[in-house]
Image (spheres, rainbow, N blue to C red):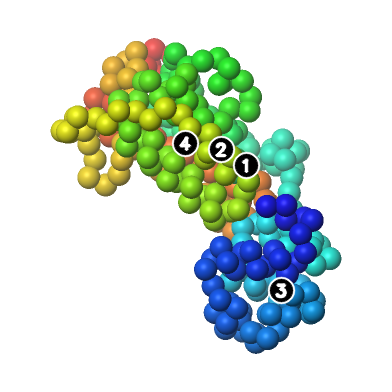
Amino acid sequence: MDTVRRPLGALLRTWRNRRRLSQLDLALEAGMSARHLSFIETGRARPSREMLLRLADCLQIPPRPCNDVLLAAGYAPRFAERPLTDPDMQSLGASVQLLLDAHDPYPALAVDGKWNLVFANKAVAPLLAGVSPKLLSPPVNVLRLSLHPEGMAPHIENLSEWRANVLLRLQRQAEASADEYLDDLLRELTSYPSPREAPEGSHAVGHSPIATPLRLRTESGSLAFLSTTMVFDYPLDINVSELLIEVFLPADAATAAALAQTAAGR
């Protein structure tokens, strides 16, 4: 959405529709009259900054578009936005890298709000063998890297189910954030050739009853991973709020042993 150039009322109405709320629903949740909300959406009333922040919280507007809503009303942004390379952010970067390194010999990485790689530990590189060099040129988008026909896709043994999970995750993120870049990325990834459905019973090896594993053919054999993510709680900076740390855990003893052996060889 071109949020900076759109009127405040149109922005709020778009977010309200995205959250499938009527004017009455939102007004009750925000502690205001439906008439007042209607006047705000039609441009007949200008809300206070506090009222806008309350509406943004009720609508669960992410930090970046929340700033756009405030700017559209003529108020200062709520969240700072500093690049992760900024000197003031160096301590954060060092802490994230320390966390990823501590996860070695298991792969771990950090991505920004557009799924571009920001940090990674040494266990990630061996998993990228055979990937086209053009996909490793910065900025490296890890979702594109995962599903691209010249990326990791040919080496993912359960590509059909892994692809479905990645696309669903990205779709939910795009819907929640109203980010056009994520919409475009979703269309791109969806356009990649769909894998053939795996034969029935072929998911038995490395299967987990709690999550979909990533099963990857590597020079160290077939490896199975479960992934988990971490985000910062109550961040006051947009780029920090969008930073996502993803760690991969071995889904079986054979994978754990293979990763330990690879790390020892390094």
Q: Is residue 201 left or right of residue 20?
A: left
The answer to whether any part of residue 116 appears in the image is yes
Mark 4 vs mark 2: which is more N-terminal?
A: 2
Q: Crowding near pointer 2: few (<14 within 10 Å), some, many (20+)?
A: many
- Measuring from the top left, give residue 102's x and y in whole percent: 46, 33
Q: Nearer the viewer, residue 141 or 40?
A: 40
Position above or below: 28 against 103: below
Mark 3 closeness class: few <14, some 14–19, many ≥20 residues within 10 Å: many
Q: Position of residue 187 (x, y in %)?
A: 53, 38
Q: Answer left or right for 53 relative to 95.
A: right
Q: Look at the image and tell me whether residue 249 can be seen.
A: no
Marking on residue 190: 4
- Disc sitting over residue 185 in the figure: 2
* Residue type at the position of mark 2: Leu
Mark in front: 4 vs 1 = 4
Considering the numbered disc 1 on the image, is that residue within a helix, a strand or a loop?
A: helix
